Image: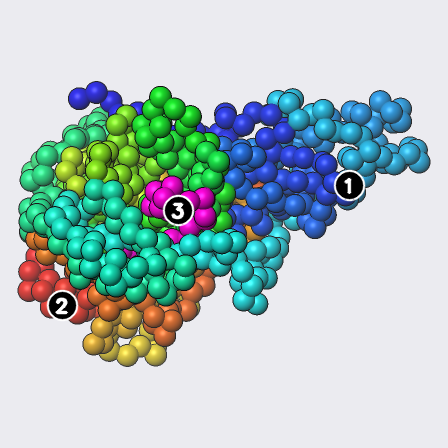
C-alpha cells in the first residue's frame, strides 16, 4: 500500500509557510499594532494569550494590540487550529516576529539618535535612551518596509523577568459581547438581502434518495426554492421559520433506500473489519524467566461519541460576480478553501473558476472536526443557486447528531507480565479503531470529505478517515506508547479501512481512550499485587515533571486521605498522562458517589504546561476538558441500528447537566524557562481513567466498557475477572 500524504496542517512551525514579518504584524495606525494570526479562537481564549505574547515582546500595552479578523486573504496560513498547538506553534511565531521588529526598531533608533543599543528602553511602543532625550515610536520609525523581511529566529526575545503580561491572568478579550448578549457568533450574522436555508439528508450517508415529490412541494411552498443535485436537497426561503417548515414538509415527500451497513456487534466489527497496521516497538534488552512472570490481559472499549456542540453548525455564503465568499466557524479555513476549490475546478473546468474567500467567525461550540466545514460547503452549493443573494444555512440538531463526524469507537487490548518484585515486562497495547481525521485538505486526489460531496449527482468519493502522523501526535494511537519506565513494549494500531459511521477529529483523538485504558490497567496491575496504585505508578516513573503533577494532584485534595465524612458508595481514583507524550503533563484525582448513578463530586487537576501565558486560560481549558470527559465517560454514546444512526436529539444523547458538574480545583506548575506546550486536551484521558478507578474503589466493579452507566455496572459486575 502506498503511503498516504496528509496535505495540510501538520507543520511543526508556523513560520514555514509564513516567513516574513508582514505575515504577522502591521504598524499602519499610529499607536496601534495589528497582529495577524491564523490560529482561530473558538472559545479557548487563544486570541487573548497571543495578544499577551505580542504586547510583551513589543513593549506595548495590551490595549495597543489589535487582532485582525482571520480570513484566507490577509491572514497567515497556519493549517488547522487543533491538537493544542496554538501557543506552541503560533505563539512561538508571534514571539519571534515581534522580537525581530523590536530588534530592527532599536537598530533604527540608534542610527537616528546615536544612542548605544544597551541604553534603549521601550514603553508603549516609544523608544528612548537613558543617555539622551530623543524619543521615537514604532510608527515614526516607518517600519512598513519590514513587511517583506523574514522573521529572524535568532532575534533576542524578552527575558522572563521583564514580562508584564505573560504569566498573568489577563481577562479574556472576547467575553464582553458574550456576557452582555452582544453578537459574537456566526449564528448572529445577518447580511443584507440574505436568504435562509435548510438541508434534508438521511441519517446514514450510504443511503440513496429514491424519490422526491417536487410537485407536491411546489404546491405547498410556492415561494420556497427547492435545490436538488443528486441526493443533495436544500430549500431557500425569505424567512427562517418558513425554511424550517418547508424542510419539515419535504421530509414527508421523500423516500430513501437504507443499506443495512451499520455495525452489529461492535467488538466483532472492530476486530474483523479490514485494517492497516502501524506498530511501535521497544525491544527488551533482557528477558526474565517466563516462569517468574504472571500474564495479565484486559480489554477496554469506547463507543462512538458525538460532538454535541450546543449551537448547531452554521455558515453563510454569497456567490456573485464569479466570487464565492464564505463565513465559517471552521478550524481550518485554508484547508476548507482548498477543498471547495477542488469542487469548483471540476465544475468550472475549461472556464473561469470562481475566486474563493473565507472569513472565520467563531461558532457556539467546537470540539474538533464538527460539521462546520460541511455546512460551509452546503451553503456554497446553495449560494450558487441563489441569484447572487447571500445564504444563511443552519443545520438541524438531528443532522448535527447523525450526519456530522463522530469520535470513533475504540477497542484496546492490554497485556503485560508482572514479576514478583512488581516490575512490568512484555507490555503490549493493541488498538482497533477508525482513523481520527477526515478534515478538508487531507484527502487523496479525487476525494472530498464533505458529506454533500458524496450526495451530488456527480459524486466525489468520501474518504475513510486517516490519522495524523506520529510527529503530530498520532490519531488512534495517540498516547498509546507508554510513558512508564518499562524495559520493553509493543504498540499495534489497526486503523479500519471501512467506515460505515463517519469519524474524524474529536478532542484528544485516540488519546482519550488509550489513556483511559492504560491508567485503568495500571490500577488493575497494582490491585493484583495488593499495592497502592499511586505508589505503583511512582515506582515505574522517573520523569520528575510527571511525578510532580501526580504528587500535586493528590496533595491539593484533602478528601483524598480524609475519609471521615464518607458515605457508602464513595470512591477515589487517579490517573496521569502527558498529552501526545509531548504536550502537557497532567494528573487528575477524583472522588465519586455511586448511588442510583455515578456522580463525580470532586476533581483535582495538576498540570505542567511549561511557561504559562495566561493561568486563567490554562485552568479554564483543563477544567473544561475534565467536565467534558465526565460527560463522555458517564453518559455519552452514539446509537444506531443496522440501517441508520438513531441519535437525533438531546433526548437520545444525554450529556452532563449543570447540576451534575463536579467541584474542580486546578493547580499549575509554572516553569517560565521551559517552552510552552498545549493544555486544551490534556485532562480528558486522565479524568476518564480516574473515574473508572474511583468506581472500582467505590463498588469493587471494574467497568471496561464506556460509558459507565448503571446498566454497564450491572453487566460488568457479573463478567469481571
The quarter of the picture where residue 533 lies is: bottom left
Q: Nearer the viewer, mark 2 or mark 3?
A: 3
Name the colouring of the figure: rainbow
- Give the labeled residue for mark 1: 30
Q: Is residue 127 above or below residue 361?
A: above
Region of the chain picked out in magenta, as a range = 377-401
564 left or right of 421 in image: right
Q: Which mark is residue 413?
A: none
The quarter of the picture where residue 369 lies is: top left
105 left or right of 518 in image: right
Q: Is residue 140 above or below residue 376?
A: above
- Give the labeled residue for mark 2: 711
The kind of secondary structure element at disc 2 is: helix
Residue 377: horizontal and vertical position, in percent?
Answer: 35, 42
Q: Is residue 595 magenta?
A: no
Cα separation between marks 2 and 1: 65 Å
Q: Earlier in the sequence, mark 3 or mark 1?
A: 1
* Residue lying farthest to the right in this orientation: 133
Residue 516: horizontal and vertical position, in percent?
Answer: 26, 51
Residue 347: horizontal and vertical position, in percent?
Answer: 32, 30
Q: Nearer the viewer, mark 2 or mark 1?
A: 1
Q: Which mark is residue 386?
A: 3
Q: Residue at x 84, y 22 (%)?
A: 111
Label 2 crowd bin: few (<14), some (14–19), many (20+), radius 10 Å: few
Q: Quadrant of the C terminus?
A: bottom left
Question: Can residue 434 be seen here?
Answer: yes
Q: Is residue 379 magenta?
A: yes
The kind of secondary structure element at disc 3 is: loop
Q: Earlier in the sequence, mark 2 or mark 1?
A: 1
Residue 148: horizontal and vertical position, in percent?
Answer: 64, 23
Amino acid at each position: 500500500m502506498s503511503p498516504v500524504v496528509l496535505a495540510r496542517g501538520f507543520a511543526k512551525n508556523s513560520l514555514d509557510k509564513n516567513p516574513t514579518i508582514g505575515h504577522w504584524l502591521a504598524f499602519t495606525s499610529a499607536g496601534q499594532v495589528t497582529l495577524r494570526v491564523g490560529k482561530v479562537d473558538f472559545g479557548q481564549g487563544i486570541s487573548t494569550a497571543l495578544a499577551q505574547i505580542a504586547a510583551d515582546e513589543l513593549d506595548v500595552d495590551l490595549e495597543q494590540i489589535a487582532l485582525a479578523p482571520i480570513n484566507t486573504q490577509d491572514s497567515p496560513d497556519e493549517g488547522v487550529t487543533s491538537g493544542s498547538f496554538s501557543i506552541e506553534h503560533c505563539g512561538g511565531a508571534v514571539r519571534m516576529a515581534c522580537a525581530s521588529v523590536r530588534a530592527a526598531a532599536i537598530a533604527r533608533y540608534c542610527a537616528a539618535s546615536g544612542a548605544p543599543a544597551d541604553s534603549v528602553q521601550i514603553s508603549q511602543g516609544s523608544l528612548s535612551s537613558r543617555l539622551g532625550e530623543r524619543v521615537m515610536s514604532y510608527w515614526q520609525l516607518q517600519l512598513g518596509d519590514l513587511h517583506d523581511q523574514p522573521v529572524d529566529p535568532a532575534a533576542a526575545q524578552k527575558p522572563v523577568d521583564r514580562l508584564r503580561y505573560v504569566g498573568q491572568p489577563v481577562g479574556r478579550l472576547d467575553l464582553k459581547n458574550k456576557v452582555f448578549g452582544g453578537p459574537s457568533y456566526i449564528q448572529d450574522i445577518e447580511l443584507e438581502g440574505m436568504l435562509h436555508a435548510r438541508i434534508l439528508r438521511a441519517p446514514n450517508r450510504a443511503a440513496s434518495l429514491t424519490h422526491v415529490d417536487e410537485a407536491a412541494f411546489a404546491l405547498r411552498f410556492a415561494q420556497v426554492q427547492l435545490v436538488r443535485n443528486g441526493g443533495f436537497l436544500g430549500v431557500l426561503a425569505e424567512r427562517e421559520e418558513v425554511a424550517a417548515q418547508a424542510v419539515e414538509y419535504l421530509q414527508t415527500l421523500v423516500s430513501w433506500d437504507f443499506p443495512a451497513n451499520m455495525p452489529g456487534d461492535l467488538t466483532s466489527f472492530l476486530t474483523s473489519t479490514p485494517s492497516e497496521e502501524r506498530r511501535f516497538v521497544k525491544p527488551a534488552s533482557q528477558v526474565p524467566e517466563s516462569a517468574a512472570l504472571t500474564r495479565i490481559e484486559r480489554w477496554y472499549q469506547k463507543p462512538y461519541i458525538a460532538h454535541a456542540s450546543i449551537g448547531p453548525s452554521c455558515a453563510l455564503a454569497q456567490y456573485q460576480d464569479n466570487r464565492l465568499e464564505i463565513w465559517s466557524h471552521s478550524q481550518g479555513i485554508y484547508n476548507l478553501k482548498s477543498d471547495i476549490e477542488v469542487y469548483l475546478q471540476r465544475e468550472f473546468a475549461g472556464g473561469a473558476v470562481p475566486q474563493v474567500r473565507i472569513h472565520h467567525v467563531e461558532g457556539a461550540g467546537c470540539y474538533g472536526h464538527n460539521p462546520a466545514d460541511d455546512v460551509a460547503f452546503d451553503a456554497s452549493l446553495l449560494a450558487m443557486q441563489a441569484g447572487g443573494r447571500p445564504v444563511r444555512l443552519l443545520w438541524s440538531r438531528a443532522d448535527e447528531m447523525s450526519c456530522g463526524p463522530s469520535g470513533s469507537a475504540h477497542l484496546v487490548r492490554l497485556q503485560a507480565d508482572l514479576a514478583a518484585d512488581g516490575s512490568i515486562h512484555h507490555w503490549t497495547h493493541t488498538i482497533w479503531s477508525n482513523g481520527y481525521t477526515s478534515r478538508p485538505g487531507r484527502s487523496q486526489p479525487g476525494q472530498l470529505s464533505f458529506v454533500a460531496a458524496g450526495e451530488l449527482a456527480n459524486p466525489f468519493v468520501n474518504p475513510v478517515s486517516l490519522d495524523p502522523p506520529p510527529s503530530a501526535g498520532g490519531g488512534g494511537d495517540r498516547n498509546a506508547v507508554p510513558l512508564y519506565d518499562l524495559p520493553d513494549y509493543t504498540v499495534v494500531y489497526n486503523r479500519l479501512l471501512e467506515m460505515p459511521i463517519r469519524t474524524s477529529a474529536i478532542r484528544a483523538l485516540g488519546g482519550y481512550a488509550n489513556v483511559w485504558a492504560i491508567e485503568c490497567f495500571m490500577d488493575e496491575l497494582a490491585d493484583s499485587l495488593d499495592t497502592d496504585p499511586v505508589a505503583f505508578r511512582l515506582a515505574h516513573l522517573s520523569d520528575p515533571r510527571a511525578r510532580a503533577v501526580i504528587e500535586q494532584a493528590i496533595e491539593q485534595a484533602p478528601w483524598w486521605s480524609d475519609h471521615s465524612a464518607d458515605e457508602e458508595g464513595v470512591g477515589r481514583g487517579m490517573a496521569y498522562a502527558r498529552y501526545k507524550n509531548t504536550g502537557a503533563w497532567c494528573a487528575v484525582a477524583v472522588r465519586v458517589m455511586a448511588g442510583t448513578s455515578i456522580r463525580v463530586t470532586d476533581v483535582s487537576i495538576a498540570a505542567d504546561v511549561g511557561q504559562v501565558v495566561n493561568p486563567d486560560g490554562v485552568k479554564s481549558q483543563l477544567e473544561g476538558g475534565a467536565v467534558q470527559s465526565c460527560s463522555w465517560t458517564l453518559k455519552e454514546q452514539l446509537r444506531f441500528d443496522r440501517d441508520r444512526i438513531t441519535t437525533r436529539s438531546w433526548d437520545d444523547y444525554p450529556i452532563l447537566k449543570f447540576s451534575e458538574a463536579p467541584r474542580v480545583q486546578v493547580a499549575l506548575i509554572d516553569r517560565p524557562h521551559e517552552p510552552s506546550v498545549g493544555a486544551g486536551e490534556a485532562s480528558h484521558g486522565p479524568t476518564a481513567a480516574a473515574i473508572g478507578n474511583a468506581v472500582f474503589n467505590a463498588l469493587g466493579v471494574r467497568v471496561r466498557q464506556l460509558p459507565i452507566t448503571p446498566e454497564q455496572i450491572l453487566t460488568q459486575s457479573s463478567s469481571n475477572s
